[in-house]
């Protein structure tokens, strides 16, 4: 089922309520362009080509090498490579006995709703631009991995024409992309461990995001998603770089701005609390006293604690 079919089905009441909710709330949904299963021997050759969609290649048997945007990428059994759109690539069989692989091309369809806070796989792939994450991403899995199992189920289900097959197939696709996003995020974080030169720019980007949004109801988890890191990894890396937790940094931004407003304006304390992002004046006063050692009114009067 492609996106237009899904939208039409939702508009005519053909889909269950859960499906309608998914289509209305998601800002980016994947759909498959094609799937191919092939077996080639070592005499096979391929001319370089490019596509306007993502291409995921799963190596089932044998060894091969991809040349992607001029870079050689070796693939062994249970390896997966995801090639970004418009990257010139070709495939060369290395095993004397040939190789067996599955190719799946996919795109993402945008939805007019922008309220969905989760990060799409396309956004992730476009965000990660350094080193091995530039033109492609590789994953080394095992044959019992959930991603591989789902890929096989999708291929089988696409051959069926029974009622409900399209719906089931789309659910499987959604599940696979969730698992892919998780696996890619883990690979991304693993690539950062012990590489402060790559972590610091991410933390700097997170800080810029905080500075532009600290007056809103943002959480450390939201900031972590913004730089495509898990909450636990982001918190640890942020503390290592800045010496404080993400939440403490957000609160510091708010209190710094509040102090400026106390000294430079005649706004009431409650109004200032709301402007800098606190849900209540009481909470604001508690945090202000903790960070400054005085109440907001004492600060305004220019008195020392």
Image (tube, rainbow, N blue to C red):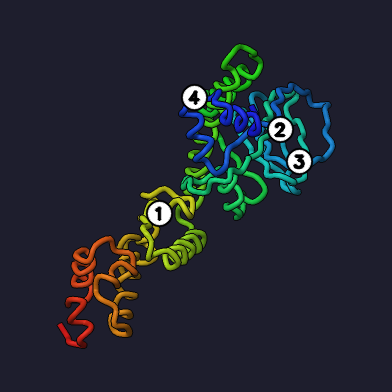
Residue at 33% in and 64% down:
277
Per the model, the C-alpha gap separating discs 4 and 1 is: 37 Å
Q: Earlier in the sequence, mark 3 or mark 4?
A: 4
> How many C-alpha atoms fall within 10 Å of the one at disc 2: few (<14), some, or many (≥20)?
many
Residue wearing tag 3: 51
Which residue occupies 32% across, 60% down? 247
Q: Residue at label 2?
A: 64
CA–CA distance in space, label 4 to label 2: 43 Å
Q: Residues within 10 Å of mark 1 (few under 14, many from 20)?
A: many
| Residue 114 versus residue 11 in the image, above or below | below
Q: Earlier in the sequence, mark 1 or mark 3?
A: 3
In the rendering, at what x and y percent does residue 57 appear? 66, 32
Query: What is the quadrant of the C terminus in the image?
Result: bottom left
Nearer to us: label 4 or label 2: 4
**Labels 1 & 3 near each other (Cβ < 8 A):** no
Numbered tag placed on residue 234 in the rendering: 1
Q: Nearer the viewer, residue 58 or 287?
A: 287
| Upstream in sequence: badge 2 or badge 3 | 3
Q: Are marks 4 and 1 in contact (CB under 8 Å)?
A: no
Residue at the (45%, 51%) spot, across then down: 225
Secondary structure of residue under mark 3: loop
Between marks 2 and 3, how big is the CA–CA gap? 20 Å
Q: Nearer the viewer, mark 1 or mark 3?
A: 3
Mark pair 1, 3: CA separation? 34 Å
Q: Secondary structure at mark 1?
A: helix
Q: Which residue is mark 4?
A: 16
First along the sequence among labels 1 and 2: 2
Answer left or right for 137 relative to 211: right
Q: Residue furthest left?
A: 305
| Image x and y of residue 258, in percent | 30, 75
Report crowding for label 3: few under 14, some 14 to 19, many 20 or more residues within 10 A (C-alpha): some
């Amino acid at each position: 089922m492609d996106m237009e079919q899904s939208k039409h089905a939702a508009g005519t009441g053909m889909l269950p309520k859960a499906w309608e909710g998914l289509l209305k709330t998601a800002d980016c949904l994947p759909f498959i362009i094609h799937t191919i299963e092939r077996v080639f021997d070592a005499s096979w050759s391929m001319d370089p080509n490019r596509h306007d969609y993502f291409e995921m290649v799963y190596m089932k048997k044998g060894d091969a090498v991809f040349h992607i945007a001029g870079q050689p990428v070796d693939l062994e059994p249970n390896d997966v490579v995801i090639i970004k759109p418009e990257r010139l690539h070709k495939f060369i069989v290395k095993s004397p006995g040939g190789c067996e692989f599955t190719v799946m091309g996919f795109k993402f369809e945008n939805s007019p709703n922008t309220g969905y806070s989760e990060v799409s796989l396309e956004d992730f792939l476009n965000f990660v631009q350094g080193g091995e994450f530039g033109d492609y991403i590789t994953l080394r899995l095992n044959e019992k991995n959930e991603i591989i199992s789902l890929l096989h189920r999708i291929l089988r289900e696409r051959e069926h024409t029974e009622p409900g097959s399209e719906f089931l197939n789309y659910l499987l696709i959604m599940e696979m992309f969730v698992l892919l996003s998780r696996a890619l995020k883990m690979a991304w974080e693993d690539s950062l461990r012990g590489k402060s030169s790559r972590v610091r720019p991410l933390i700097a980007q997170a800080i810029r995001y905080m500075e532009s949004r600290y007056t809103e109801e943002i959480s450390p988890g939201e900031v972590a998603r913004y730089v495509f890191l898990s909450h636990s990894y982001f918190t640890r890396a942020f503390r290592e770089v800045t010496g404080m937790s993400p939440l403490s940094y957000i609160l510091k931004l708010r209190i710094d701005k509040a102090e400026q407003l106390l000294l430079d304006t005649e706004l009431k304390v409650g109004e200032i609390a709301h402007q800098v992002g606190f849900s209540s004046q009481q909470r604001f006063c508690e945090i202000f006293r903790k960070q400054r050692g005085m109440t907001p009114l004492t600060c305004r009067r220019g008195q020392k604690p």
